[in-house]
Amino acid sequence: MMLRFLPILERTNIEMADLPPAVELNGCLLYLGAFPEGAGRLLVNPRIEIDDNPDCVFLVAHELAHMLLHIFDDHPPSVVDLLYDPAKRALYEHYERQADRLAAHLLVPPEILAQYPSERYPTVESLARALGVSPRVVRLALDEPHASLEPVRGYLQKLTGRRDFVHRDIPTA
């Protein structure tokens, strides 16, 4: 299990489980009740290695970002139905990009980005390794500013005691 997500998964009663093999998604979050008092299942495609695999780290952050965006933005609690409606495909992709961007900024928060590049993290790859994410996630955080990040980070702080999804305190200078 990915320790970086334990505070939010425990506080919001979300369990991780495998998606049925026939489902052609990498993952999805099913949540019943009002967030964070309800309960949910974060379903991951069984072909994806879970234990701190950078791709799975981003997948979990992305699915949690959908819930956080629903609280703070005009974002539906689920976008799966949009995926299967060709007339709503552009809207689906818009919401997926929003979740990608928020997930990237919670995995590579602004105070760490502000220190990049540095002697300790001279490349995107070195920063990605230190954070346990893929270089694509670091590039996304660098290229896609997130205007409304502070309310989400404040909410996470109150909810879990952590402002982001960084796996440990890493040196930033």
Image (cartoon, grey):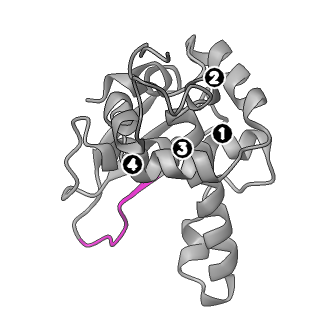
Q: Nearer the viewer, mark 3 or mark 2?
A: 3
| Mark 2: amino acid | Leu
Q: What is the quadrant of residue 120 in the picture?
A: top left
Rendered image: mark on residue 68: 1
Numbered label tally: 4
| Mark 3: amino acid | Ala
Residue under label 3: 104
The stretch drawn in magenta includes residue 26 = yes
Residue 76 position within the rendered picture, expressed as x and y whole percent measured from the top left: 70, 56
| Mark 1: amino acid | Leu
Range shown magenta? 22-28
Rendered image: mark on residue 135: 4
Q: Is residue 171 above or below residue 146?
A: above
Question: How packed is label 3: few (under 14 Cα within 10 Å), some, or many (20 or more)?
Answer: many
Q: Of marks 4 and 2, which one's residue comes earlier in the chain?
A: 4
Q: Nearer the viewer, mark 4 or mark 3?
A: 4
Residues at marks 2 and 1 touching, judged by CB atoms closer than 8 Å? yes
Asked whether the viewer can see residue 27, the reply is yes
Q: Residue at x 58, y 32 (%)?
A: 113
Residue under label 2: 156
User: Quadrant of the image for the N terminus?
Assistant: top left
Mark 4–mark 2 Cα distance, whole angstroms, equals 24 Å
| Mark 4: amino acid | Pro
Residue 73 position within the rendered picture, expressed as x and y whole percent measured from the top left: 79, 47
Label 1 residue SS = helix
